[in-house]
Every structure is written in C-alpha cells, then in structure tokens.
Amino acid sequence: MSEAKPRSDANGAHPLDAVIWNALAGKQNHLAIGDARARRYPTDIGRFAAVADHSPESFEALRSLIDAQDSVALVTANEVALPSGFSVIRRAALLQMIWQGKLGQRSELQHVSLAGADVPDMLALTAATEPGPFGPRTIELGQYIGVRSEGKLAAMAGERMRLDGFTEISAVCVDPAFRGRGYAGDLMKLLIAAISARGETPFLHVFTSNQSAIALYRKLGFVDRHEMHLAVVSDARG
C-alpha cells in the first residue's frame, strides 16, 4: 500500500493529535488496510482505525472497512460527530501522555524478550488484566518484554503505535498475584530507554478514570499532553 499524507503540524496540529492516522500512513503503513481516505489495522492486531478527514466520503470509506459483527476504535483529539450509518458502542475519555523525564539508572529487572511462542501466555495475561485491546498479532507492532516467575508470565509491556519521532508504550499489565513488586514501572523504564536510544519520544494513552496508572506514569516522567476521545463504532447497516 502506498503511503498516505501524514497529518503534520502544518496547520498547527501536533502529529499525536491524529495518532492512528499518522501511524498507519507512516511507519506502520505495511500493516494498514484501506486507502487514502480511511485506514485500519487488521482485526487480529487491533481494532484501531482513522479517517483522513471528516468528509462524507472518508466516513463511507471507513464504513466499508467494518465487517458484519465487527467494530473499530477511533482515537481523536476532538469528539467526532459520526454521520448516519454508524452505531456507537462506547465513548470514553483518554489522557494522552508524553515522556519528558530524564533517563536514570538502568533497571536491573530480570526480563525476557517476548516472541511468537509467548503469545498464548500474553493473551491469557491481557485477558486477566484488561490493559486494552490485545490480539494474537499485536506483537507485530513492536518490541514486547516481560517477566516470568513461578512458571508463568507475571508481567509485560510493549510498543504499539509508531510514527515518525514517537513510539507508544502499551499493554502494561501485571498478574494480580505478582503486583507490588515494581514490575510495571521497571518494564516501562526499559522501554523508555530503548525508545529514547532510537531518538524517539515515548507516549501512551490511559483512561482518565485510571488515576493509579496516571500517578505511576507521572512518577516515571510522563506529562499530560492532550485529552483524547475514544469512540468504538460498528456499521449500523451491517
């Protein structure tokens, strides 16, 4: 698929305002389904999608990417007024945070790099902890690392959306039996160091209601950038 035009700050917008579009139009273009009007990730990677603009033609292109019994998630800087033809399953507020901290002493956490053979354990952990959408091919989006203890995957974190200059940290989760050991923070420190070493800036999304996670992220050096709007939608005509 040819690359679509990224949304840049030519009009005063930050690249992360249109994070899904800019990821699918750029570094993750090879994973995109769609065209220059609407794009999405494959369902088994993630249900995120975006439109190039809010024209009727772009929304119609988006609707054509939603199969029967399927849905997609839009993450936008401003709440989107959807035209007829869509059913809204869920709306929620997300806080987009960007890392502006300083690299400290490297974490000495004993961790492992996660690969295809680890996917069943990763799916079990995300099902138990619900950190956000995670599918059997989500691991293709970037680097995932974890902690194994007592014969199971105790914690993990990884990279999701990537665009020029930025990489999202996502799927930060810890098995309830292993909480309180600092695994989440240490895994994030490792990812922050790896992303920063590439000359990129880490960022993340968190539900505004998840105050405990927000407190941890601020402690790690993340600052609030923008409140984003999540809309999970399906094809009302399907």
Image: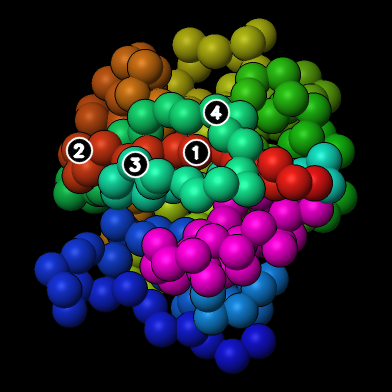
**Residue on which disc 4 sits:** 90
Measured Cα–Cα span from mark 4 to mark 3: 12 Å
As rendered, which of 149 and 17 lies closer to the eye?
17
As rendered, which of 88 and 8 lies closer to the eye?
88
User: Comparing marks 4 and 2, which lies closer to the viewer?
Assistant: 4
Q: Earlier in the sequence, mark 2 or mark 1?
A: 2
Question: What's the residue type where badge 1 is placed?
Answer: Ala
Question: What's the residue type where badge 4 is placed?
Answer: Arg
**Residue on which disc 1 sits:** 231
Q: Which residues are magenta?
A: 38-67
**Residue on which disc 3 sits:** 79
Is residue 44 covered in magenta?
A: yes
Q: Residues within 10 Å of mark 1 (few under 14, many from 20)?
A: many
**Residue on which disc 2 sits:** 224
Q: Quadrant of the N terminus?
A: bottom right
* Residue drawn at 74 percent across, 25 percent down: 127
Measured Cα–Cα span from mark 2 to mark 1: 20 Å
